[in-house]
Amino acid sequence: MSFTKRRVMIVDDSQAILVVMQAIMSELDIESVTTCRSAAQAVEKIRQTPHQYDIVFTDLNMPEMDGMEFIRQLGLLKYSGGIVIISEMDEKVIDLASNLAKQSSAHLIGNISKPVQLIDVERMLKKTDTYTLHNRNRVEYITEDELLHAISYNEITPFYQPKVHRGDKKVKSIEVLARIVSKKDGKIILPERFIPVAEELDLINLITFQLFEKATDEFSVIKSELHYPLKLAFNLSPVQLGDLSCPDKLALILEINRLKPSDIILELTENQPIDKPVQLETLNRLRIRGFDISLDDFGTGFTNLRQLKALPFTEIKIDRSLITHIESDRFAQVIIDGLIDIAQNQNIDIVAEGIERIEELQYLERYKHSLLMQGFLISKPKALAELVRWLHSWQRMINSNS
């Protein structure tokens, strides 16, 4: 993986650390490196050009403004990149630092210990590349006319990606992912190119209900391939929680397709806070009706561990930025240990999403009684016919190993 185009800032009051970090960046072929001897200097540079840096490496123990205050300031400046702490951290400090960063709307990727090693810096750069907000920032969105055409011509199409239990390997639920599939040439447009546009134009409900109707209609085909219960999972934007009629509309579509709310998981992304009274009322109404509620992309947004106990989630999905290279990432290991404890105490399912490497799968073996798995290593999102073929293959694999 090439890091040539990465734009890095290093903040440390030790000139020796700055020299070492610069040498490591040079070894990794990173040309754009900015160093600061104080957090105040770094804040000023980022204030002037907040989108200039992809990742900031910072010490914690610095004079005048320490690392935690610096991270808080980055949140106030709406810095959208990843943050890595250059310091030895015990488990309690990691947990607290992560929560404080979230409260400040800053994204803490992890920590590396001194003396700094090239392999650790490289791992953090890879994790930053998987940070989903970065990917969204570089997306070329479709136009309003293109989106309206897709909705009018019923081109919103469900693709499916299974969540598999780590222990018994059974498919526990299948996430429904929106795609635009052109009826003219079969071209597929991914959701990051049109969902933000739909939210901005207040068209997200039309897309959701079109997707919901198609997938619930196809669910009978999926269920006929398996001989045990499973659920369908749909993504719901926090924006949609502002619509108090949302639970009634979803329930009506289910009734038409002879399904119950208990057959459905609604996945809420973490990219916006869920704290307005109307959002909380809608969230509660969905749970009262019997829908399961999942917190998607945990680790990239606004929800901290303590809030998970207060909101009525039945599932938490750990973002791939925490799963990537988890076998060697102490920071991510501590966060996931904390999540597993909460899950066991609160009867919440935990999903590790974005699994792409066998090493990640092997590390997660220790949680096999408490964890669901999702990712390209298991299955990429698939259209219905392709999903059915995958289910046949997966069932044969389970039966041959039993």
Image: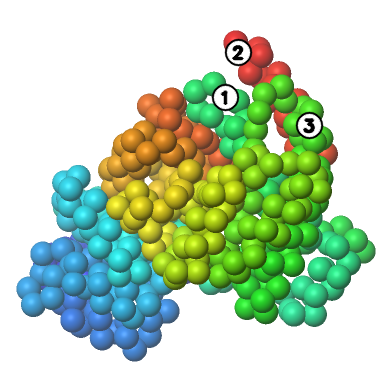
Q: Amino acid at mark 2?
A: Asn
Q: Is residue 25 shown left or right of residue 361?
A: left
Q: Quadrant of residue 87?
A: bottom left
Asked if the residues shown at circle 2 and circle 1 are in contact, with their CB atoms under 8 angstroms apart, the answer is: yes
Q: Depth check: 117 or 327 in front?
A: 327
Say few, some or many: other residues with alpha carbon within 10 Å of mark 2 (under 14 / 14 to 19 / 20 or more). few
**Residue 251 placement, left or right of 378:** right
Residue 147 point in image, percent of width and height: 77, 73
Q: Select label 3 or label 1 by which is in front.
A: 1
Q: Earlier in the sequence, mark 2 or mark 1?
A: 1
Give the residue pinned by disc 1: 169
Q: Position of residue 195 (x, y in %)?
A: 65, 67
Residue corresponding to mark 2: 401
Q: Residue at x 15, y 63 (%)?
A: 60
- The residue carrying mark 3 is 389
Is residue 16 or residue 319 the one in the foreground?
319
Question: Alpha carbon of mark 3 to alpha carbon of mark 2: how far?
Answer: 19 Å
Residue 278 placement (x, y as % from top left) = 50, 69
